[in-house]
Amino acid sequence: MAADATTGIIICYKKVAHTELRNATSMTEDEELKKILAEKLRRMKEVSEAKMRKMGAQDKPIELTDATFKGTIEDSSLAVVDCWASWCAPCQMIAPVI
């Protein structure tokens, strides 16, 4: 009986040690994954910002007038134009959303 009790204790110890090792490994893998994802996100942002600079993209709205409209549209590869008037009821309704 003494041998069986000792064997049971050793097996129990091995299971606990294995579980602790697995938990420690999981924690290390999680930390490593977080680092990898953070680095990938940083690279993606750099590439995106470089593309935006290359395209000459604006990071803020510009005001167009009759005189500047045609030239701005022709010079831009992509432009979003928000036509708005202070007297326009639908414009006033959508203004807080935009």
Image (spheres, rainbow, N blue to C red):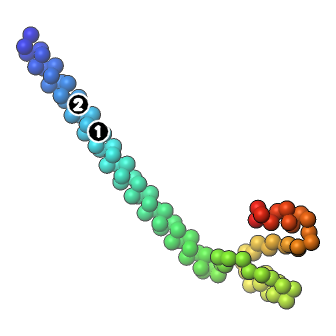
Q: Which residue is mark 2?
A: 16
Q: Is residue 40 above or below residue 4?
A: below
Find out whether the residues at labels 1 and 2 contact each other: C-beta distance under 8 Å: no
Provide the secondary structure element on which disc 2 rests. helix
Residue 67 picture quarter: bottom right
How far across and down, in percent of the image, does residue 43 sit? 47, 67
Q: Is residue 67 above or below residue 25?
A: below
Q: Amino acid at mark 1?
A: Arg
Residue 73 picture quarter: bottom right
Q: Which residue is mark 1?
A: 22
Q: Is there any visible trace of residue 65 in the rendered image?
A: yes
Q: Residue at x 23, y 28 (%)?
A: 15
Q: Residue at x 76, y 61 (%)?
A: 97
Quadrant assignment for the C terminus: bottom right
Disc number lying in front (1 or 2): 2
Q: How would you rate the neighbour count of disc 2 (Cα within 10 Å): few for under 14, some for 14-19, many for 20 or more?
A: few
Instruction: Tell me, for residue 79, which label it has, or none.
Output: none
Judged left or right of residue 47, residue 97 is right
Disc 1/disc 2 C-alpha distance (Å): 10 Å
